[in-house]
Image (cartoon, rainbow, N blue to C red):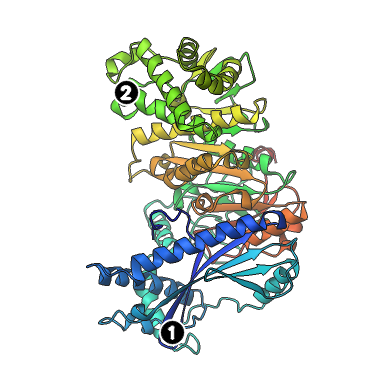
């Protein structure tokens, strides 16, 4: 569903669907966690999101009268049936049966008679509302939950029926829709992600009977998908099948000594996120996993905001950045003749301007165009055009600064941008010293130490590097679908304290979200570490398959992370430093695995 033109571009969280008699009710639900200080603003935003979604739903489906109305309603019916089938697969009974929708083949009822309504849920632990506090705002119900209300809600959710195994006898509860649900499961859900991965794993086992085949799980059965494949490697090995296998050993599953391994080549995407408080062991875990990936021949690019992710080995290039006197710099305008028209001067110009805008969002259109003109003039002075033959020459941001010094822009415009230019003149992160070619990150592991830079310089340098890297892999094109094992990855990008980048601006978050969605197609794996799940936008979170939750000493962080992991808060509280709860979005039915992360260098020495 797309937002209605002119009504904002952010949709609500959920749709609730049920029947009241013969009338279909579709309720738009927007849920927000807030504090009392920002309650009014958050309510306003939530009402806009709920209203936008309700209008889009009505315009695109319920009240739509175009020639393809029937096709649209059929699509909506199929979406509802799909999720109804998933509810049945999880053993959860719905309030209506699939037959109430699927049997109406010759009629658009109940859609002709449907009612669309909206509701906003505001979770405000430092508020004071009493119980069941509601108000109506222009047709939308707003319900408020304070600390007492949240506790009562949690208690009620604790009594929610636990999912049961799907039965095939059609008995799914009193709604009488079990048989229809079972049929939908067979037709529409049998090829879901977990099932496809299971078949792919079995195929690999038949074709290549190696030590990386699924091993015996703690429960005694075969591991169907290989996010955490329990295995028993020989002493000194670093993974389930050694450095040449698909898997990286993460540690031992508590309380026993069974090993757990992470196998990115076998997953829908090879991304991983680590969530945990300060001192939980995130940095050590990042070092361990990065070292293991590099040992399998995949270059690792570490964007290090705190300067403490040092990887062992001579195959790593380390670059430190400071305010001045940098020995190296990243050239955002480096042209590679081998890539031809895919990475032109014009493309590099606008990518840099977008990165600049993401860090300095207060700069207006005229100032951004002024910066773009400066870059164009710098290319022109060097005789560089879109003709690849001219790319034997190059410019840096130092050339752009020279053009700015000689520009005849109005004093008001120069004054607004001069302070920014002065910063880059002093920082020398995009000129001076020896250039770092982003192309080299696909050949050799590298660590960019940004710990000595201030927030603006750090964020724009990281954004420029990521933009340039993704321009490069997109220019190289998607990976060969026949690629096997670690050949499915051109490079892994590791970002510690990723909230520093994701929290810099909405543009930076949007860029990272785009990378998370497209990375696997072009052979890029992402590993992010952050203190709080709430720091990660949902569009990024949803594109990361494997998640490690570590301890959080702060009670508020611990409660919110436990909620995100869908485990009791006591489970996170019980973790020691270096322990984590392992979850996978592609294995939603798997119980959380508590494991002890053991760095590879400690295991090798044991």
Examine the rendered structure and indicate whether residue 147 appears above or below residue 184: above
Q: Can residue 204 be seen here?
A: yes
Task: Note whether residue 256 is visible.
Answer: no
For residue 235, the mark is: none
Question: Image quadrant of residue 310?
Answer: top right
Q: Quick one: 139 or 391, which is closer to the camera? A: 139
**249 w.r.t. 456: above or below:** below
Dot 1 falls on a residue whose secondary structure is helix
Q: Say which quarter of the image contains residue 321.
A: top right
Of the residues under marks 2 and 1, which one precedes in the sequence?
1
Q: Position of residue 309 (x, y in %)?
A: 65, 33
Q: Position of residue 51 (x, y in %)?
A: 48, 63
| 264 shown above or below 167 | above
Quadrant of image for the N terminus:
bottom left
Q: Which residue is mark 2?
A: 338
Nearer to us in this view, 205 or 574: 574
**Neighbour class for label 1 at 10 Å: few (<14), some, many (≥20)?**
many
Residue 104: name its quadrant. Answer: bottom left
Q: How many marks?
A: 2
Q: Residues within 10 Å of mark 2 (few under 14, many from 20)?
A: few
Q: Horizontal and vertical percent for residue 534? A: 62, 52
> In this orientation, which residue lies closer to the viewer: 334 or 52?
52
Which residue has dot 1 on it? Answer: 178
Left/right placement of residue 289 relative to residue 112 reads right
Q: Nearer the viewer, residue 535 or 379?
A: 379
Q: CA distance from mark 2 to mark 1?
A: 59 Å
Q: Residue at x 68, y 68 (%)?
A: 145
């Amino acid at each position: 569903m797309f937002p209605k033109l002119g009504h904002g571009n952010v949709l609500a969280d959920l749709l609730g669907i049920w029947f009241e008699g013969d009338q279909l009710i579709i309720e738009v639900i927007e849920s927000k966690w807030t504090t009392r200080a920002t309650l009014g603003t958050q309510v306003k935003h939530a009402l806009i999101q709920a209203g936008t979604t309700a209008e889009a739903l009505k315009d695109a489906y319920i009240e739509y009268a175009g020639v393809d109305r029937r096709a649209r309603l059929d699509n909506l019916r199929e979406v509802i049936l799909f999720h109804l089938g998933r509810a049945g697969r999880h053993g959860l009974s719905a309030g209506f049966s699939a037959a109430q929708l699927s049997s109406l083949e010759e009629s658009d009822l109940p859609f002709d008679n449907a009612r669309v309504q909206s509701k906003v849920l505001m979770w405000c632990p430092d508020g004071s509302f009493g119980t069941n506090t509601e108000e109506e705002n222009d047709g939308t119900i707003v319900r408020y939950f304070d600390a007492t209300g949240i506790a009562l809600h949690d208690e009620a959710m604790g009594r929610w029926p636990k999912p049961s195994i799907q039965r095939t006898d059609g008995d799914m509860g009193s709604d009488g829709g079990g048989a229809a649900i079972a049929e939908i499961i067979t037709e529409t859900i049998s090829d879901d992600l977990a099932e496809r991965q299971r078949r792919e794993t079995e195929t690999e086992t038949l074709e290549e009977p190696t030590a990386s085949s699924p091993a015996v799980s703690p429960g005694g059965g075969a591991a169907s998908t290989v996010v955490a494949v329990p295995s028993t490697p020989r002493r000194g090995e670093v993974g389930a099948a050694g450095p040449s296998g698909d898997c990286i050993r993460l540690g031992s599953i508590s309380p026993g000594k069974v090993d757990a391994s992470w196998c990115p080549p076998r997953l829908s995407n090879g991304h991983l996120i680590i969530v945990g408080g300060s001192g939980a062991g995130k940095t050590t875990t990042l070092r361990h996993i990065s070292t293991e990936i590099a040992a399998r021949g995949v270059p690792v690019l570490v964007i290090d905001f705190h300067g403490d992710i040092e990887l062992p080995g001579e195959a790593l290039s380390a670059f430190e950045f400071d305010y001045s006197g940098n020995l190296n710099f990243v050239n955002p305008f480096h042209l590679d003749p081998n890539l031809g028209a895919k990475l032109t001067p014009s493309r590099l110009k606008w990518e840099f301007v977008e990165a600049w805008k993401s860090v300095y969002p207060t700069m207006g259109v005229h100032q951004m165009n002024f910066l773009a003109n400066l870059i164009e003039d710098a290319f022109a002075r060097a005789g560089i055009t879109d003709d690849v033959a001219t790319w034997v020459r190059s410019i840096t941001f130092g050339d752009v600064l020279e053009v700015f010094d000689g520009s005849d822009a109005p004093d008001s415009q120069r004054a607004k941008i001069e302070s920014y230019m002065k910063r880059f003149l002093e920082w020398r992160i995009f000129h001076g010293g020896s250039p770092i070619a982003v192309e080299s990150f696909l050949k050799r592991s590298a660590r960019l130490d940004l710990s000595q830079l201030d927030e603006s310089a750090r964020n724009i340098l990281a954004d420029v590097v990521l933009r340039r890297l993704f321009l490069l892999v997109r220019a190289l094109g998607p990976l060969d679908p026949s690629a096997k094992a670690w050949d499915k990855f051109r490079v892994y990008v590791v970002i510690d304290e990723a909230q520093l980048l994701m929290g810099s601006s909405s543009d930076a978050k949007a860029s990272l979200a785009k990378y998370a969605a497209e990375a696997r197609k072009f052979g890029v794996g992402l590993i992010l570490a952050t203190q709080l799940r709430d720091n990660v936008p949902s569009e990024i979170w949803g594109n990361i398959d494997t998640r490690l939750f570590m301890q959080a000493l702060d009670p508020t962080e611990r409660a919110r992370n436990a909620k995100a992991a869908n485990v009791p808060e006591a489970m996170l509280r019980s973790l020691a430093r270096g322990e984590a709860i392992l979850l996978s979005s592609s294995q939603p039915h798997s119980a959380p695995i508590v494991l002890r992360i053991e760095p590879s260098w400690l295991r090798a020495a044991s």
